[in-house]
Amino acid sequence: MQKSYSRLLGVVGKPNTGKSTFFSAATLALAEIANYPFTTIKPNRGIGYVRTPCVHSEFKVQDNPKNSMCTDSIRLIPVELIDVAGLVPGAWEGRGLGNQFLDEIRRADALVHVVDASGGTDCEGRICKPGEHDPLEDVKFLEREITMWMTSILKKDWAKIARSAEADKKGIYAALEDRLSGLGIKRSHVSEAIRKAGLNADKPTVWSDEDFERFVDTLRRVSKPMLIVANKVDLPTAQANIERLKKLDYTVIPCCAEAELALRRAAEKQLIDYKPGDCNFQLTQPDKLTPGQTRALETIRERILLPNGSTGVQDAINTAFFKLLSMITVYPVEDLEHLSDHNGKVLPDVYLVPYGTTAHQFAYIIHTELGESFIYAVDAREKRRIGEDAVLKDRDVISVVSAKKRA
Ligand SMILES: Nc1nc2c(ncn2[C@@H]2O[C@H](COP(=O)(O)OP(=O)(O)OP(=O)(O)O)[C@@H](O)[C@H]2O)c(=O)[nH]1
Ligand SMILES: [Mg+2]
């Protein structure tokens, strides 16, 4: 498979909530998991997958995936995940393991906040009586940590930034884009945050402290969109908390990371037939399982998969890309008749691109040269030409016609 992971998902939260378990389940990379805070110190990086029904069955062709995988008509598109150390209140000013871990998520496009929904770990991740800790507090705390971290980066030269933005006509968008590019924050994020916070972009010098705080908080929401993974749903105290978490302004995904990890490992050993995100599994080699393993798998089926529809791990990754980041999948092909590339590989690649991407922008995403020599594109489903400004749709199969023949 080709290696091009342009998207990064950050797995964040306080210690001991199951971040590394979620990460391992999603990537099958080995990460240390233990029932105490700060098990993870160095961040873990690995490859997880966005799951989408492949277009090959609709077009009635056999595909030869190159930049992704396809099993049973399910396309799995690689994305990078980073599992960082747990954050404790005050991390932004150096508490716990400090803010180096916030720095690890600079490049993240979106965040998955893993919460211990059972309320069995206190605000610093120490074990407490299940139900004793309120996970809603963890959501507030994490928002504050990230906002304060961004504030600390911006605050020290804010007066200078604001003055020079007004003086040299460069404007606040360009000034902030320069200052924040290291955090993966783009000009579009800055302008959206200023608009949503209702601030005057021409006069940043007159923003009050309160305006500045509102701006940074909005910028956090816009540039690091987040969903809540309500983990440990297998524990009895989780359900009531999940209902309460759902009242917050976030997408909440009930999850049992431990169950997903067990299923993925069993599938890897070919003991069960299970794909990430499936609502059920089949035992393929029941005689190879011990009675204990069979019982554990059946418990997962009855307590997690059947009532919840899935373990939640795959849903979280898909929701991050399709909902938080509003991405779509587009399949580029060169030969329209065979839906293949120039080597005859059928539907080799699929790209995750933001909704709103035009045919011309898509050509640039495939290759700068293809963008530069773009003439028009053809929609393989409708078999018709589309112009450079045509906005692509999810599951489009597109052939770009350019002035130059691609190497
Ligand atoms: N009951 C239950 N326990 C879980 C689940 N997921 C993880 N755990 C347990 O929670 C504990 C912490 O898991 P980790 O994955 O190490 O947590 P972490 O958030 O990475 O912890 P730090 O690295 O210390 O920040 C371990 O004992 C896991 O087995 C789950 O879905 N249900
Ligand atoms: Mg960990």
Image (cartoon, rainbow, N blue to C red):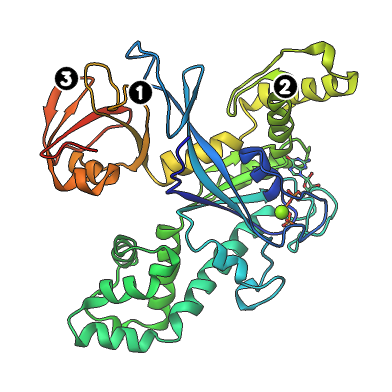
Quarter that holds the C terminus: top left
Q: Say which amino acid is labelled 3.
A: Lys
For disc 1, the marked residue is 345
**SS assignment at label 1:** loop
Residue at 34 percent of width and 66 percent of height: 197
Residue at (62%, 28%) from the top-left corner? 310
Q: Label 2: which residue?
A: 301
Classify mark 3: helix, strand or loop.
loop
Left/right placement of residue 312 relative to residue 300 reads: left
Q: Nearer the viewer, mark 2 or mark 3?
A: 3
Label 1 lies in ligand 1 vicinity (Cβ under 8 Å): no
Residue shown at the point (45%, 38%) measured from the top left: 2
**Residues at discs 2 and 1 in contact (Cβ within 8 Å):** no
Q: Is residue 402 visible?
A: yes
Answer few, some or many: residues within 10 Å of disc 2's Cα (few below 14, many 20 plus, some between 14 and 19): many
Question: How far separated are the C-alphas under marks 2 and 3?
Answer: 44 Å
Camera-nearest residue between 23 and 253: 23
Instruction: Give the quarter of the image for residue 187.
Output: bottom left
> What's the amino acid at mark 2?
Arg
> How far is the residue under mark 1 from the one under mark 3?
20 Å
